[in-house]
Each structure stands twice: as C-alpha cells, then as structure tokens.
C-alpha cells in the first residue's frame, strides 16, 4: 500500500457498501481516477454485506405506480415525489443491467426461467429479489471483485475518514476565502500507521451508511456509527429528517448475538409473532397483522413487552412454514442454532433494534448535496424516498440507483478546473503528547450514548425524555471534545467523536419536530 502522505483522485468515494461500490464502478467505467476508502480491514464489511431480505424489483403483475404507492404509504406521505418516481421507474432496469447482466448475481429462481420474488411488509406484491437470506453478502462480494479489475480504481481498506476538506475552511491561502464553499476531498486516517493522509479530489461521494450503533440495540454492524452525517454537518452541508430512525421489529434476542437480524421475509413467508404465553397479538393492532408497516409492528412488540414486563416476544416460523426452513433461511437457521435455538423446532425470541436512518445529507436527484462538489448516496443521504418510514428492501435499490446516478452526473459534468495541493491547506494537527487512550473510557462513553439514545430517543419518545437526552448528550459532547483533544489519534477516538455528534443530530431533530409520524413516534 502506498505510503504517500497525500493522494489525488478525480472522485473520492468514502464507504464501500452497495451505494459507494455502485458509484465507484460507474466512475471507473467512465475512465475517471477513483479512490475508495473504507475504515474496515475487509473491503466487503458494510451494512450491505449483512442485508438478508433482498432488493426490490418488480414482480409478476406489478408496475412502478404500485411500488410508488407502497413507498409513499409506508413513508406516511412525506416522501419526495420526484425521488420516489426515480426509484420506482429506474430501479428494475438498474437491477437487470448492473446486478443481473453485468455482475451476474445469482438471484433465487422459482423455475429455471423465472426469478423468485419474496414478500415483505408493506408491499402489495411479491417483488423482492433475494439469494435466500444472504443477499447482501453476494451482492457486495461481486461488486468488490468487479472493482478490483479496474486499474483506475484504488481501494484503500483500513482508512478512516476523519474530516471533509473544504475550501475556504481548511485553506491557508487568503484569496480562497472569496470562493464559494466547496469540498475538495478528505483527511483520512491510515489505521495502521496512525498518520492522517490528505486525499484531494475534484468530487467527493459520501457513502458511509447509517448510524444504528448510536443505539444500545441495533441490527447494524459495529462500524455503523454515522461518520458521514457528522463530517457533512461539520462541513456545512444540510442534514434533514434525522428524527426518522427506523427500528426493525425482529432481531434475535440473545446476549451474544449482536442484534442478528431475523429478516422480514420470515414474516413474509408466514411466521407469526406471539407473546411468551404463545398468543398471537398483531391482529389487535393492524388488519395486515405481521405484514403491517415496520414501525407499527415494532411499536406493537414494544407494547406487548412493556405490558407483560418481558424482554422479548416470539417469532414462530415452524408452526406455519410449508417449506424446508433450512433451505429457505440457511443463514438464519445456522446462526440461531449457534445460539442454541433450533428454528425448525421452536419459536425464535426476538426484540426490536435500531435499523435504518431515513434522514441524512439532503441531496437532489443526482446525489448532489448543498455543498458544492460533495455528493452523498445510500443511507447517509436523504433523497426523500423513504419519508418518515422506509419500505422494506428499498435501501439496496436506492444505493444502487443513486450511486450510479451520482457518478453519471459527475462524469458528464466533469470540470477539473482547480487543483489543490498540500501546501494550500492546513497540515493535520498531531498533539504533542499524543497519549494512548484508555479503552475503558471510550467504552463507558459509548455506553452512555447508546443507553441515552435507546431510552430517551428510541422507539417511543416524549418531550421530557428527549429534553433529558439533549442535556445528557450536550454535557457528554463537551467532555468528549475536551478529554480527547490531546490523545493519540486512532479510529476509536474518531468514531466516538462522530457518534456523539450523530446522537445529538438525531435528538435535536426529534425535539424540533412536534408531529408524531412514522418512525418518529411521540407519546405526548
Ligand atoms: C430484512 O431482511 O428484514 C431487512 C430488509 C430491509 O431492511 O430492507
């Protein structure tokens, strides 16, 4: 790996899930020089990798208008109609052209010449393409394999983005102050050496995914801290709708399972939610029962748990499955078995978990943010597709469509007018003492953030709880900024600073919105 202190690219892509990888692939095809950074040591590690259910296409007797209706109904009507239109009208073609024809992704088939479409909550048709219950893994692996074939793409694992480089903010040259603010790349920490490198780019695409790990219980992998929201906010880009945090109704209830997801397709295939006493309850909340919108199922579970003072409910697949569970859900079967639960014989204990952020960096139909030269795609962005509550399995599709659109736009408007060099901007500041940080302190700060968010800014919110969260987080932010100023820079410190800011963004947004809607549910 190159040890150069500064690097230059036409496009810097931060994050390598489906959105970042689609952007990088499209840019690579158009011959632009691309650098992709991910903070993980494995390029594939991302939210996408763990996506189980699948990706929305159009099923039999299905059409874009119907998909649009489902998206808007799930989003409680506050979706951006132009963005919904793009997703519904371009989605299937993107799946066919990029995933099926180009990357040859082997989606499950019901017959040799017919794709198999799964069902999920809120969809009026079976239209989810899947590879059993490990869709994201295959999709992600195929993208990385494809990207490795391009000599104009540099893939940097183990590189944590610390801050976006903006002119004039980071500039040493006083004449730059007259320029319109714009993004020219990022400071990126090489996790191994502990040195911060400067990556200059004509365009920067944020594809850092979501922020589930600011909550105590989440289905997201540990890296989903929300780095992109924090960096974009500091750089001055508009961030919207952060109060709409979607909770997935069913993650495995087990101390060591780390929020392992029990896919909605399990309910799509007939599984029913039951109390600990074995009674179904969804019929008391919504006539669509287990296939009611995700936020409603989550709140119903929460209420049942609260009423019976229980830490979980059951998801019973075995009593309803008319198929071989091991074949349809091999990953869920295997993982549950590792934790001592045989889903072919017994119901699965489940709890809700923070799953998806419907808000983010506000972007237009091409992924452009309000800050010139900064784009955002995938979960970190807010196109407005999801409104107040995302429809299941639309996230991979949104990442694919907007990742590709962003790079198409850049390639057709490419204008490398100004190039910056290291001497134009401020050097990264390394504290003189640079002490190693005590992990016990970092852990405790994370526990405080996560419990505050779970208890006060979680599934059911009240003004009082949110005010308490704001006070606690403000104080914690102040402590974190002060305490970690002089420590040696590492990925954990960067993550903590981003995490506390993201928790504040969610809480302030929730406090600023008195209307209870979708995944922002206010009791009072
Ligand atoms: C799932 O498989 O339940 C997750 C799908 C999604 O969140 O879109």
Image: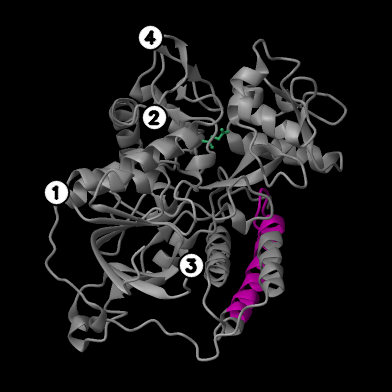
Q: Are marks 3 and 2 in contact (CB under 8 Å)?
A: no
Q: Nearer the viewer, residue 516 or 196?
A: 196
Left or right, 208 with reference to 9: right
Secondary-structure class at tag 4: loop
Q: Which residue is mark 1?
A: 412
Helix or strand or loop: what does disc 1 sit on?
Answer: helix
Q: Residue at x 36, y 36 (%)?
A: 84
> In terms of secondary structure, where does tag 2 sit?
helix
Q: Earlier in the sequence, mark 2 or mark 4?
A: 2
How far is the residue under mark 2 from the one under mark 1? 29 Å
Q: Quadrant of ligand 1?
A: top right
Between residue 403 and residue 394, name the one nearer to us: 403
Q: How is the image coloured?
A: one colour
Instruction: Answer whether labels 1 and 4 touch (C-beta < 8 Å).
Output: no
Q: Is mark 1 within 8 Å of ligand 1?
A: no
Q: At numbered mark 3, what does the secondary structure look like: helix, strand or loop?
A: loop
Q: Which residue is mark 3?
A: 191
| Residue 343 seen from this side | yes
Do residues under tags 3 and 1 come within 8 Å of each other at their CB atoms? no
Q: Is residue 467 magenta?
A: yes
* Earlier sequence position, callout 2 versus callout 1: 2
Q: Quadrant of residue 329?
A: top right
């Amino acid at each position: 790996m190159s040890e150069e202190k500064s690097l230059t690219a036409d496009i810097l892509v931060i994050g390598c899930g489906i959105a970042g990888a689609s952007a990088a692939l499209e840019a690579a095809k158009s011959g632009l020089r691309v650098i992709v950074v991910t903070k993980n040591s494995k390029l594939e590690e991302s939210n996408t990798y763990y996506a189980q259910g699948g990706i929305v296409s159009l099923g039999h007797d299905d059409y874009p208008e119907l998909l649009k209706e489902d998206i808007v109904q799930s989003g409680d009507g506050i979706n951006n109609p132009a963005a919904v239109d793009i997703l519904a009208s371009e989605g299937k073609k993107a799946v066919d052209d990029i995933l099926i024809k180009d990357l040859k992704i082997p989606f499950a088939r019901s017959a040799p010449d017919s794709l198999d479409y799964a069902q999920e909550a809120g969809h009026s048709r079976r239209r989810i393409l899947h590879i059993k219950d490990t869709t994201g893994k295959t999709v992600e692996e195929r993208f990385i394999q494809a990207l490795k074939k391009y000599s104009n793409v540099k893939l940097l694992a183990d590189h944590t983005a610390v801050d976006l480089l903006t002119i004039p903010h980071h500039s040493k040259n006083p004449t730059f102050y007259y320029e319109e603010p714009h993004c020219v790349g990022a400071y990126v920490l090489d996790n191994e050496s502990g040195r911060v490198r400067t990556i200059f780019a004509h365009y920067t695409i944020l594809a850092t995914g979501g922020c589930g790990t600011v909550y105590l219980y989440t289905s997201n992998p540990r890296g989903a801290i929300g780095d992109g929201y924090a960096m974009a906010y500091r750089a001055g880009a508009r961030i919207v709708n952060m109060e709409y945090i979607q909770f997935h109704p069913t993650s495995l209830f087990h101390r060591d399972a780390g929020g392992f997801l029990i896919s909605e397709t399990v309910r799509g295939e007939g599984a029913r939610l039951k109390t600990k006493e074995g009674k179904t309850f969804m019929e008391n909340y919504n006539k669509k029962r287990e296939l009611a919108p995700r936020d409603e199922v989550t709140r119903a579970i929460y209420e049942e748990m609260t009423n019976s003072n229980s830490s979980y409910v059951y998801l019973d697949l075995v009593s309803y499955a008319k198929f071989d569970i091991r074949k349809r859900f091999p990953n869920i079967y295997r993982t549950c078995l590792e934790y001592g639960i045989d889903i072919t014989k017994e119901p699965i204990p489940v709890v809700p978990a923070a799953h998806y952020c419907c808000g983010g960096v506000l972007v237009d139909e091409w992924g452009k943010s309000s800050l010139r030269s900064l784009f955002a795609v995938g979960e970190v962005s807010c196109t407005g597709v999801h409104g107040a509550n995302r429809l299941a399995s639309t996230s991979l599709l949104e990442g694919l469509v907007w990742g590709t659109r962003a790079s198409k736009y850049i390639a057709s408007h490419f204008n490398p007018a100004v190039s910056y060099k290291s001497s134009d901007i401020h050097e990264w500041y390394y504290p003189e003492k640079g002490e190693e940080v005590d992990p016990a302190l970092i852990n405790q700060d994370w526990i405080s953030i996560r419990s505050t968010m779970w208890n006060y800014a979680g599934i059911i919110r009240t003004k009082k709880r949110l005010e308490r969260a704001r006070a606690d987080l403000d104080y914690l932010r102040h402590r974190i900024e002060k305490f970690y100023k002089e420590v040696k820079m590492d990925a954990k410190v960067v993550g903590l600073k981003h995490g506390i800011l993201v928790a504040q963004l969610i809480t302030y947004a929730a406090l600023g919105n008195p209307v209870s809607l979708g995944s922002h549910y206010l009791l009072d």
